[in-house]
Image (cartoon, rainbow, N blue to C red):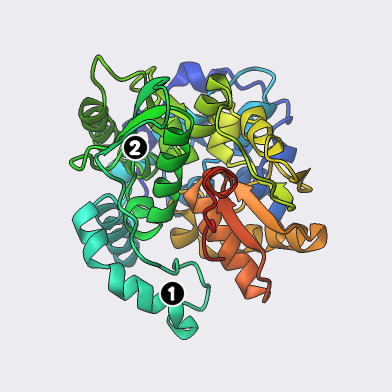
């Protein structure tokens, strides 16, 4: 493992780094600082490390990299920061610099390469469906229980006609893992949009948005994927590109102003379809990138409150990450499990009937953490609860 001198660290922006005044407002918002209380595992501390590398007072060595790797990239610090520091861009630049100049141990290189090659590959994910399904049913193959239990595939039609008078024509981003292993979320999203008067276009040829690549230190490849996906989804007759995964949506909207989260779009459109009553106590969990990067917080709550019979509640430490964070729960499993278990403890104490959220990674992470505790509380996407109220669908397996 090479310790790289900071003279190679031109990738991190001095102007962005200098925006931080080290006030410390970010500390209480940072999940890893909450776990460990270590200054270098806070946004302020990591910015200090970035500065030392750029200024030449510290090399990008094993210790330096470990603090950058331990960051979830949840960007909750950006909501807390009074100076408006763009930490999301800084951490992506730092990770890209690590991948450019630091020689990781062989097992880390292989693992990261395998993850970042596999998850954006739609055909490979489809091939792996039966193996993932088996692992999801046999707990000894997945002791952490983060592998999804795959049910019948619900492919979204290329065109789903609007019900009643057409109010909008939208393109639906299908995603990668969600498309192949959690397809019921996309199917529910398309049905809800159609019921609200939207013609839904879901091109088969769409591929990965590139979010995982950007977050994993490959921003150029991430941007290339996003641009290709926008080109596949957008045309002059599309009113909006709909996303239903917080992390993917926050990445994709950097490349098209037409990108909107499903809850954001439906809230602006206004309800038309009738809702049947769902007598449920629902705890809403904010996806990090949905709340902090996209600033979508009130809209999903409005949609849930619009379902008759739903009693909506927030969870303690609601702004704290659940530990999923893209590939974080694969490459930093101890920290991810600690955060997942912390979130699960709050859910168990609150005792809701259902937990609703807006991101597939959060769903998988919370289901796994609850399962480790032997708790059977359902964790669903907001679109699935809307689908249940509007179309009478069962929602999903727990």
Residue 368: quadrant of the picture: bottom right
Q: CA distance from mark 2 to mark 1?
A: 25 Å
Query: From the viewer's perspective, is 292 left or right of 353?
Result: left
Query: From the viewer's perspective, is 302 left or right of 164?
Result: right
Give the mark count: 2
Q: Residue at x 40, y 28 (%)?
A: 198
Q: Which element type, helix, strand or loop, lies under badge 2?
A: loop
Query: From the viewer's perspective, is 61 left or right of 221?
Result: right
Which image quarter holds the C terminus? bottom right
Residue 96 lies, in percent from the top left, at 35, 38
Q: Which residue is mark 1?
A: 136
Q: Which residue is mark 2?
A: 173
**Marks 2 and 1: CB-CB under 8 Å?**
no
Residue placed most toward the observer, 384 or 369: 384
Q: In this view, which residue lies farthest toward the right?
A: 349
Badge 1: how crowded within 10 Å, few (<14), some, or many (20+)? some
Q: Residue at x 32, y 67 (%)?
A: 107
């Amino acid at each position: 493992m090479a310790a790289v001198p900071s003279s190679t660290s031109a990738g991190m922006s001095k102007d962005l780094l200098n925006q931080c005044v080290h006030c410390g407002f970010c500390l209480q918002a940072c999940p890893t600082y909450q776990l460990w209380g270590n200054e270098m595992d806070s946004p302020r501390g990591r910015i200090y490390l970035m500065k030392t590398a750029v200024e030449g007072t510290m090399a990008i060595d094993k210790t330096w990299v470990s603090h950058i790797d331990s960051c979830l990239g949840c960007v909750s610090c950006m909501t807390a920061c009074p100076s408006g520091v763009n930490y999301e861009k800084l951490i992506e630049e730092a990770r890209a610099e690590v991948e450019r100049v630091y020689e990781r141990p062989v097992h880390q290189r292989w693992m990261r390469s395998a993850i970042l090659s596999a998850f954006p590959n739609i055909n490979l994910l489809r091939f792996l469906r039966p193996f993932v399904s088996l692992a999801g049913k046999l707990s000894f193959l997945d002791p952490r229980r983060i592998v999804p239990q795959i049910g019948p595939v619900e492919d979204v039609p290329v065109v789903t006609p609007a019900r009643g008078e057409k109010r909008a024509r939208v393109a639906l981003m299908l995603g990668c893992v969600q498309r192949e292993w959690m397809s019921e979320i996309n199917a529910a999203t398309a049905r809800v949009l159609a019921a609200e008067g939207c013609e839904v276009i879901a091109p088969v040829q769409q591929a990965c948005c590139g979010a995982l690549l950007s977050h994993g230190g490959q921003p150029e490849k991430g941007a290339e994927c996003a641009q290709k996906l926008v080109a596949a989804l957008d045309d002059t007759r599309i009113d909006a590109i709909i996303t239903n995964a917080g992390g993917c949506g926050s990445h994709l909207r950097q490349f098209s102003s037409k990108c909107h989260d499903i809850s954001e779009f439906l809230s602006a459109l206004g309800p038309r379809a009738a809702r049947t009553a769902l007598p449920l106590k629902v705890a809403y969990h904010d996806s990090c990138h949905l709340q902090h990067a996209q600033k979508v917080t009130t809209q999903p709550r409005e949609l849930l409150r619009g379902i008759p019979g739903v009693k909506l509640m927030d969870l303690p430490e609601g702004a704290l990450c659940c530990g999923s964070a893209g590939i974080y729960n694969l490459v930093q499993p101890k920290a991810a499990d600690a955060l997942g278990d912390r979130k699960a403890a709050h859910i168990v104490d609150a005792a809701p009937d259902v937990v609703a959220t807006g991101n597939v990674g959060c769903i998988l992470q919370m289901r796994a953490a609850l399962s480790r505790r032997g708790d059977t509380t359902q964790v669903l996407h907001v679109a699935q609860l809307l689908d249940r109220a509007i179309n009478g669908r069962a929602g999903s397996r727990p």
